[in-house]
Image: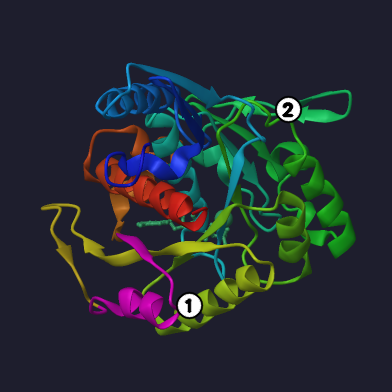
Amino acid sequence: MLTANNFPEVGRIRTQRFDRGVLTAVADASGLSEEERKQLETSIRKAGLALDGVSEVRVAITAAKSGPMVIAVGSGKGGVGKSTVAANIAVALARAGHKVGMVDADIYGPSQPTLLAAPGRPEAIEKVLQPVETPFGVSLLSIGQLVPAGQALAWRGPMASGALAQLVEGNWADRDFVIVDLPPGTGDVQLSLIQKSKPAGAVIVSTPQDLSLIDAERAVDLFRRTDVPVLGLIENMAGYQCPHCNEVSDPFGQGGAEAGAARLHIPFLGRLALSSSLREASDAGNPPAAGEGPAAKAFADIAGTVRTQLEKSRG
Ligand SMILES: Nc1ncnc2c1ncn2[C@@H]1O[C@H](COP(=O)(O)OP(=O)(O)OP(=O)(O)O)[C@@H](O)[C@H]1O
Ligand SMILES: [Mg+2]
């Protein structure tokens, strides 16, 4: 039989049976891209055939997806680069071959339509909003597509929650992952959104300053209270990348966020320097994760770590 010793991905095997030389295995491919599903099948076959007495391996990959896996991106306070990081993680996941959706739930400053250069408004079919395709393989529903800038800000809690529910309940059926860019803060709107979208995991974005780390702590607490596994902390605007020589310097020192993550008992997912080219590209609707520079590599790494943590947290 396949065990952790002969098949490292044994956690994906749901059932296996061995009968007269035939090994039959059912594996769960949730969260994997098309290519990875094929790889999983191939490696089960290979590992199975390497076992004594196995002459044939039959593999069933469970295709019945229970809908996309939702990843919430939160921060205790505003302006830490949460939306920028969320957009680029989404693009990096799409680049890795996943079908990715984005829910921009930030009623205070919906910025995903700009970050992802999303054209137009979503259509509703039988009252279900249809996400708008962006040039980066990420489909988007944003509060900014539904109301003029600034208007949502005046909403009271229940009204905001109602509108946000429509985004969460959009047509996401074909997506592998849906990223939810939460409004900053840890109040009722965030709480009801988390209850609605039932994230499989949460990512916290923080800047190096202590104050925002205290805010990050509040965000961690919000997810703990709602039983959402915290996948880890991303430190944004960590150090300064010189626009001339690209060297990163650390006017505020280094390691604060790592220490903070350790103190909160959550994984550290990576850091991004304060960089004017990142800001300019983001403002122009060219997410750096879609490009070729060092930022693309940084976001690909972070997205990979997010996925690893997600798999760990699901056991
Ligand atoms: N690493 C970075 N380097 C330079 N600029 C950055 C970086 N990350 C984000 N920014 C810029 O900082 C500003 C705020 O970023 P962003 O909108 O992503 O933050 P936010 O936390 O979502 O804010 P809000 O609370 O308003 O939703 C934007 O102009 C963005 O381009
Ligand atoms: Mg934002």
Q: Quadrant of residue 18?
A: top left
The residue lying at 36 percent from left, 33 percent from top is 290
The residue lying at 59 percent from left, 42 percent from top is 69
**Between 244 and 44, the one nearer to me in the picture:** 44
Q: Amino acid at mark 2?
A: Pro
Q: Against 8, is 43 above or below?
A: above
- Side of 4 where 144 appears, left or right: right
* Residue at disc 1, secondary structure: helix
**Between 218 and 273, the one nearer to me in the picture:** 218
The residue lying at 31 percent from left, 39 percent from top is 7
Quarter of the picture containing the N terminus is top left
Numbered range of the magenta stretch: 252-271
Q: Against 272, is 9 above or below?
A: above
* Residue at disc 2, secondary structure: loop
Residue 192 visible in rendering: yes
Which residue is identified by label 2? 122
Check if residue 193 falls in the magenta segment: no
Q: Position of residue 2 (x, y in %)?
A: 36, 37
Which residue is identified by label 1? 212
Residue 85 visible in rendering: no
Q: Around disc 2, counting alpha carbons within 10 Å, would you say few (fewer than 14), some (14 to 19), or many (20 or more)?
A: some
Ligand 2 neighbours mark 2 (CB distance < 8 Å):
no
Q: Amino acid at mark 1?
A: Ser
